[in-house]
Amino acid sequence: MDNVHRHILHIEKNIASIDVLKQSLSAAGFELTVTEDTQTALKKLESGIYTLIIKDISEGCVDVDILNAAKVYNPEAKTILLVDTWDTENWTDKHWMYSDDILLKPYSISEYMARVALWTRKIRRASSTPKGLMIPVCWSCKKIRDDHEHNPGTGLWLGFDDFFLKKFGMLVTRSYCPECVRQAL
C-alpha cells in the first residue's frame, strides 16, 4: 500500500484499548494518531496527510466542524463518526454532510480494522480514477469546483451555468423532463 493512504487521525476522549488498536493498525501498515481535543486535531490536520478521520460524537462530543476542516485540508479524506446510540433525532445536517460512515460504540478491534480497510480501498480507488472523470459538487449549494489550472481541491466554486459556460463554452437552457411534467400536472 502506498504511503499516502496510511495516516489515520482518531479523535476520541477516554479511548479504551488504544495500545491494542495502534498495534493492530501498525501491523497492517497504518499510522494512527490519537488526540482527545479538537484544537490539537485541527493543528494535526493542517499537514494534509490524514486520509481517514475518526471522530467521537457520543457523550456530548458534538463538534463536527472538525470533519469539515478535514475535507478542507485533504479533499479526499473520509470520515467516520463514533456514536453510542443510533438515535439520530438531534443530529444536524452537518452530521450527515460531513460523515462518510458511522461506527457504533463500543466497537471491536476487528470491526474498526474492517472499516479502515474498506475506506482505505475506497480512497485508493478514488485517487486512481482520472480526475477528468470526476466533478466535485457541493453537498449543500450544488456549486461545482473547477480545479482546472489549480491544485486539486483549490479551484473556484462556480454555479452550474457558469461552470458549463467556462469549461465547455456551453449555455445552459431550462426545460422539464417528462416525469416532472407529469408531476406538475
Image (tube, rainbow, N blue to C red):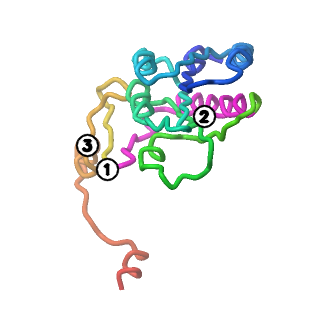
The tag earlier along the polypeptide, 3 or 2, is 2
Q: Residues within 10 Å of mark 3 (few under 14, many from 20)?
A: some
**C-alpha span from label 3 to label 1:** 10 Å
Q: Secondary structure at mark 3?
A: strand
Front tag of 2 and 1: 1
The tag earlier along the polypeptide, 3 or 1, is 1
The residue under the point 48% across, 47% down is: 96
Left/right placement of residue 28 relative to residue 140 reads right
Foreground residue, 178 or 78? 78
Q: Quadrant of the N terminus?
A: top right
- Could you tell me what secondary structure mostly forms the magenta stretch? helix
Q: Label 2 belongs to which residue?
A: 122
Position of 110 relative to 165 (above/below): above
Type of amino acid under label 2: Lys
Foreground residue, 59 or 115? 59
Q: Label 3 belongs to which residue?
A: 158
Residue 141's tag is 1
State yes or no: discs 3 and 2 in contact (Cβ < 8 Å): no
The residue under the point 48% across, 52% down is: 90
Name which quarter of the figure residue 38 lies in.
top left
